[in-house]
Image (cartoon, rainbow, N blue to C red):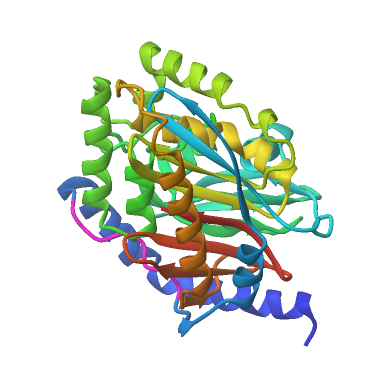
């Protein structure tokens, strides 16, 4: 059976099955909105207890490069092996600015799912942690998703990051480069209950002094003092200081806040500002860190990369193209979006 026909049959089956549970999910979402309880979105069933040769090969070629610091932040640039085959991939906001991608509430709106469609001619990458503004309430993407050109409608899994609103602002969504800070992002990777995501949003809001009538995570990014801090961090840790880098490992004070890698240096350069600004939220109001522990931090990055390259986990499908590989390290989680023998994006938190 051809690829197009298999995709059609799969989508038809999803549509038939979806019709049977739209009302129960809508009812559950309404209870969730009112009571503030319930669990997070469930991942699709995959194959567990296996390794990913694609992920392993990719990590074997990664080397830890030079470092750059600002305040409590330290970044180690990550470099890879030989260039990968060309594949045109747009970031979410690039595609949205062109009118290529449409993100809307479902016909019968529910908290944990939205509808997305790529109408353009290039692939579009949606990253777990990207904040979507609008609809009945602001949401955050729970997992990476690669949309093929002319994808047709797809369902995308989300959490709510604006607990006090369920009305207004139209049906569609925009992105302003806002991204989940490491503490919030880790809850997405854990598939935590919605209530824990709200708790994390409130924790960041209290820490930044960014109260909001609707308990909106976006209000943190809108606070002038926070914006000024993030603007300086973006200037001081500019990706242009590391040409050819495929990613970065970021430390906040003594803790490793996260690590991101992409198959293409140009794609990393376009995604880096929003990733850095999210990690810089954790460094807001923290004192400048010491440079004396650079060797220890570098070794920690190398150890994490080595451990991720040996880990077994779960390989599963999702609503986009390719597969997601997810594994657990000692104190961190790793995920990689795989497509046609490439690691499109990998993250370790």
Q: Nearer the viewer, residue 331 or 224?
A: 331
Location of residue 227 by image quarter:
top left
Q: Quick check: can you spot residue 227? A: yes
Q: Residue furthest bottom?
A: 1
The verdict on residue 41 being magenta is: yes
Q: Nearer the viewer, residue 143 or 276?
A: 276
Q: In this picture, is 141 found above or below 238?
A: below
Q: Quick check: can you spot residue 175? A: no
Type of secondary structure dominating the magenta stretch: loop
Q: Nearer the viewer, residue 169 or 191?
A: 191
Where does the magenta region start and end?
Answer: 37-44
Question: Picture coordinates of residue 242 (x, y %)?
Answer: 68, 35
Question: Picture coordinates of residue 238 (x, y %)?
Answer: 61, 27
- Residue drawn 39% across the image and 11% down it: 224
Q: Nearer the viewer, residue 103 or 290?
A: 290
Residue 16 relative to residue 42: left or right: right
The verdict on residue 227 being magenta is: no
- Residue drawn 46% across the image and 60% down it: 303
Q: Residue furthest left?
A: 35
- Residue drawn 60% across the image and 51% down it: 261
Question: Picture coordinates of residue 177 (x, y %)?
Answer: 54, 31
Residue 242 relative to residue 4: left or right: left
- Residue drawn 57% across the image and 31% down it: 273
Q: Residue furthest right?
A: 86
Location of residue 24 by image quarter:
bottom left
Question: Picture coordinates of residue 308 (x, y %)?
Answer: 48, 66
What is the total number of numbered labels drawn onto the structure image? 0
- Look at the image and tell me in which quarter the N terminus lies: bottom right
């Amino acid at each position: 059976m051809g690829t197009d026909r298999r995709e059609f049959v799969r989508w038809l089956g999803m549509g038939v099955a979806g019709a049977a549970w739209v009302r129960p999910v809508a009812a559950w979402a309404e209870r969730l909105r009112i009571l503030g309880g319930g669990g997070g979105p469930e991942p699709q069933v995959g194959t567990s207890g296996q390794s990913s040769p694609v992920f392993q090969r990719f990590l074997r070629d990664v080397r830890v490069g030079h470092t750059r610091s600002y305040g409590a932040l330290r970044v180690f640039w990550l470099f890879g092996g030989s260039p990968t085959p060309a594949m045109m991939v747009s970031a979410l906001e690039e595609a949205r600015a062109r009118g290529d991608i449409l993100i809307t509430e479902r016909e019968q709106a529910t908290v944990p799912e939205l509808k997305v469609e790529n109408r353009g001619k290039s692939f579009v990458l949606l990253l777990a942690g990207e904040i979507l503004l609008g609809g009945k309430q602001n949401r955050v993407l729970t997992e990476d998703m690669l949309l093929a050109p002319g994808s047709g409608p797809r369902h995308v899994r989300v959490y709510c990051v604006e607990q006090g609103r369920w009305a207004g602002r139209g049906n569609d969504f925009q992105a302003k480069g806002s991204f989940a800070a490491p503490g919030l992002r880790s809850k997405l990777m854990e598939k935590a209950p919605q209530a824990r995501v709200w708790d994390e949003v409130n924790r960041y809001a209290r820490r930044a002094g960014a109260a909001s009538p609707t308990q909106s995570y976006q209000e943190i990014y809108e606070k002038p003092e926070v914006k000024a801090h993030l603007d300086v961090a973006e200037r001081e840790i500019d990706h242009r200081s590391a040409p050819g880098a495929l990613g970065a490992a970021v430390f906040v004070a003594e803790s490793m806040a996260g690590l991101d890698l992409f198959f293409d240096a140009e794609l990393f350069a376009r995604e880096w500002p929003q990733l850095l600004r999210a990690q810089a939220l954790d460094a807001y109001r923290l004192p400048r860190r010491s440079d004396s522990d650079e060797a220890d931090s570098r070794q920690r990055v190398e150890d994490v990369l080595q451990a991720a390259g040996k880990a077994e986990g779960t390989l599963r499908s999702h609503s986009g193209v390719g597969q997601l590989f997810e594994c657990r390290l000692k104190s961190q989680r790793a995920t990689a979006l795989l497509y046609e023998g490439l690691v499109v994006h990998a993250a370790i938190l």
